[in-house]
Amino acid sequence: MRDFEGLKAIVTGGGSGIGAATAYMLANRGAAIAVLDLDPEAAIDRGLHGFKADVTDDDSVREAVGAACSALRGLDVLVNNAGIGATGTIEDNSDEQWRQVWDVNVIGMVRVSRAALPRLRASSNAAIVNTCSIAATAGLPQRALYSATKGAVLSLTLAMAADHVREGVRVNCVNPGTVDTPWVRRLLDQTPGPAAERDALAARQPMGRLVNADEVAAAIAYLASPLAASVTGTALAVDGGMAGLRLRPVSR
């Protein structure tokens, strides 16, 4: 499939995990790709444009977006994927942690989108896709701070979609369940029993396994593609049925 032929896309946090899977998938489907990441070397090594960017620094964001748009000679798609995690209840995370995670996961998206919008308005297929989470719509234990930021991303997506639909810019988000990414693996390694914890995370998703990064990338690609030209203000769940299904317990 070459539905992205001739289109130019920026993927933030494209150095690993969901962002890397998305960047490579869009490139394989014809897009010219620029990855913005704190460490873009892996993307550069794979033949993509890569630019160092810190989404908590507006000057860094504007410089990187400008350089990416110059290298790509325009911009049609922005994938706001850069983000960080946090574990704990509201008693466990300090004010400093709250500010840090909020700055990356929410205000970071604002900074990148703000810098990209003037270029997107010039595109005939302008799309923004934000990486949200099942944590925006389901109460997960030990994820208070992370969930709060992802709830904000969901609301931000809807507000952006309303603000920019008449400018020809579509805005959607994906809501992954627990994805087998380097970040999740690091969290598992910090638990007393990583294998048992992984099994528990898999079991809470009705399909009985973790989501993989390529599955999330495919959902992002759909929302960014001209094939989704009438889709805006939508949150697409990629969570193994976690958000909508309530299965009966397995009989013993």
Image: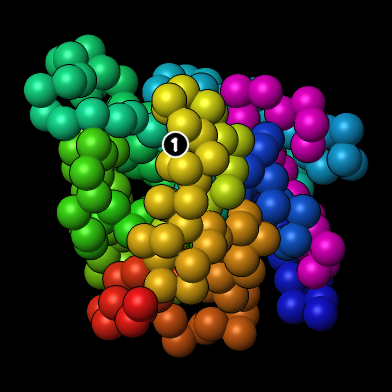
Give the farthest residue toward the left.
Answer: 91
Instruction: Indicate how the structure is coloured in the image.
Output: rainbow
Is 100 rendered above or below residue 20? above
Residue at 61 percent across and 58 percent down: it is: 212
Residue at 56 percent across and 35 percent down: it is: 185
Is 230 rendered above or below residue 22? below
Q: Which residues are magenta?
A: 27-43
Image coordinates of residue 6 in percent, x first then y, are 79, 67
Is 100 magenta? The answer is no
The N terminus lies in which quarter of the figure? Answer: bottom right
Q: Nearer the viewer, residue 93 or 151?
A: 93
Q: Secondary structure at mark 1?
A: loop
Q: Nearer the viewer, residue 113 or 121?
A: 113
Q: Nearer the viewer, residue 178 or 202?
A: 202
Q: Nearer the viewer, residue 23 or 63?
A: 23
The C terminus lies in which quarter of the figure? Answer: bottom left
Is 230 rendered above or below residue 56? below
Residue at 20 percent across and 20 percent down: it is: 93
On the image, numbered disc 1 is attached to which residue? 83
| Residue type pointed to by label 1 | Gly
